[in-house]
Amino acid sequence: MLGFSFIEIGTVTPKGQPGNPKPRLFRLIKDNALINRMGFNNKGADAAVEQLERTLPSFRKRAGDRHVVIGGNIGKNTATPNDDAPADYLECFRKLYPYVDYFTVNVSCPNVANLSELQNIDSLTGILSAVLTERDRQQTRKPVLVKISPDISLAHLDEILEISEKTGIDGIVAVNTATGRDDLSADSKQIEKIGKGGLSGKPLAAKALETVRYIRQRTDGRLPVIGVGGINTPEDAANMLEAGATLVQVYTGLIYEGPSLVKKINAALDSNVRVIA
């Protein structure tokens, strides 16, 4: 009813976990930004499946002829060593497979200890190999995307793009939250008091656009990109699409602009372009 075409749930981990200690979500109002260190707080894959089984039939019925796509964002439990991460991703993948339409492999969240290390090529290859081998066993092929950090170098991004194309990954989600605090209007003492966490919202707009544009150019448009970061207006969404994004996600923009943002974006764009979250 709000105008979304896609809903991405997660991050889902195999076992439920409380996430990081509270407080863990902070507003930087002058910057139209958030800092969060939620830490993959969720009830686990089994609870997600139960919720989907209970709600999807009525959800689909309300949607009528319009197929609203559900994505599953999957990760590892905080307590799981990185060496054992592939098993966690594989467990979530198997359990959610009958219920979601695509998967986002989240290896870039800065709020889970050492998770971003899974973006190195050996670790990422191990995770993707496990997930894609399991996908080959399924009767229906569902897209798998990798969510990347805005903090990685272009050389590292090149490596991720290379392994993504070699393994048959279907797309990239660009970008996750950032660890940097450059060029913020918020008081430095406030930022220091908040401490660690991923920055999202308007300050990420330029970096997100730059990353999406680079991926399009580097892959000659072969690899679809979900663009996310700093989308607060219809113009922001249009800029993301012009940069090369195939789809657009909004998160922090909903906090500052409210749910009407989605319809405003849809109204401003061509009728065949939709917004996702």
Image: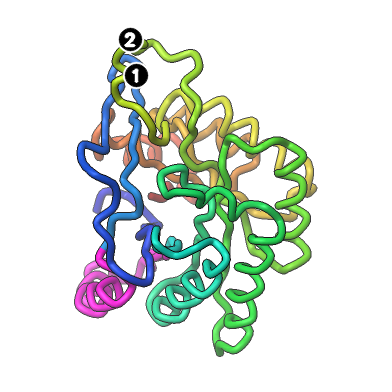
Structure colour scheme: rainbow
Q: Which of 17 and 185 is in front in this view?
A: 17
Q: Is the magenta stretch mostly helix, strand or loop?
A: helix
Magenta residue check for 63: yes
Residue 112 placed where, x, y %? 42, 49
At horizontal 48% and vertical 32% (from top left) the residue drawn is 179
> What residue is shown with label 1?
191
Dot 1: element:
helix
Q: Is residue 39 above or below residue 170?
A: above
Looking at the rendered structure, which numbered label has been put on residue 207?
A: none
Please tell me which residue lies in front, 4 or 22: 22
Tell me if residue 97 comes above or below residue 191 in the rendering. Answer: below
Contact check, label 2 and label 1, Cβ < 8 Å: yes
**Quadrant housing residue 268:** top left
Query: Residue visible at 38% across and 38% down?
Result: 267
In percent of the image, x 58 and y 29: which residue is there?
207
Classify 10 Å Cα crowding around label 1: few (below 14), some (14-19), many (20 and above).
Answer: some
In-image side of 179 versus 211 (left or right): left
Q: Identify the magenta region.
A: 43-72
Amino acid at dot 1 = Ile
Say left or right for 82 vs 54: right
Per the model, the C-alpha gap separating discs 2 and 1 is: 6 Å
Residue at 25%, 73% in the rendered image:
47
Q: Position of residue 219 (x, y in %)?
A: 78, 49
Can residue 266 be found in the magenta stretch? no
Q: Residues within 10 Å of mark 2 (few under 14, many from 20)?
A: few
Disc 2 marks which amino acid?
Asp
Q: Name the residue under label 2.
A: 187
Q: Which corner quadrant of the image does residue 140 belong to?
A: bottom right
* Residue 146 in which image quadrant: bottom right
Instruction: Residue 199: give x, y in percent of width and height.
Output: 42, 31
